[in-house]
């Protein structure tokens, strides 16, 4: 799978919904939106 096709999965800290975000979008915006509209902050992984 190419990097532009990879996704990361995180849980919303407010409601616990699972959020799937393309890696490229996560690296550009450092945030995601859960299905319930909550903003999920993303941190840059070290390594």
Image (cartoon, rainbow, N blue to C red):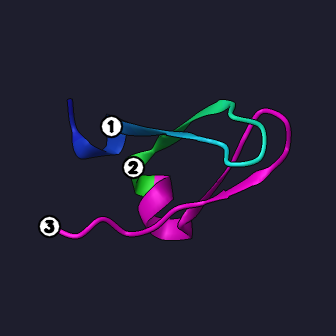
Image coordinates for residue 41, horizontal then vertical, percent: 61, 63
**Residue under the image location 52 percent in, 62 percent down:** 42
**Residue 43 drawn in magenta:** yes
Question: What is the CA distance from the residue labelled 2 to the residue labelled 1?
Answer: 6 Å
- From the viewer's perspective, is 16 left or right of 9? right
N-terminal label among 2 and 1? 1
**Residue under the image location 14 percent in, 67 percent down:** 47
Question: What is the CA distance from the residue labelled 1 to the residue labelled 3?
Answer: 17 Å
Could you say whether the residue bearing mark 1 is in a helix, strand or loop?
loop
Could you say whether the residue bearing mark 2 is in a helix, strand or loop?
helix
Q: Nearer the viewer, residue 22 or 18?
A: 18
Q: Nearer the viewer, residue 6 or 33?
A: 33
Q: In which quarter of the view is residue 5 placed? A: top left
Residue at the spot of label 3: 47
Residue at the spot of label 2: 23
Q: Nearer the viewer, residue 19 or 3?
A: 19
Considering the image in quadrants, where does the N terminus appear? top left
- From the viewer's perspective, is 11 left or right of 17? left
* Identity of the residue furthest to the left in this view: 47
N-terminal label among 2 and 3? 2
Residue at the spot of label 1: 6
Figure label count: 3
With respect to residue 17, does 4 lie above or below? below
The span picked out in magenta is 25-47
């Amino acid at each position: 799978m190419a990097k532009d096709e990879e996704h990361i999965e995180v849980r919303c800290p407010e409601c616990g919904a699972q959020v799937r975000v393309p890696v490229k979008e996560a690296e550009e915006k450092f945030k995601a939106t859960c299905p319930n509209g909550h903003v999920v902050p993303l941190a840059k992984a070290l390594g």
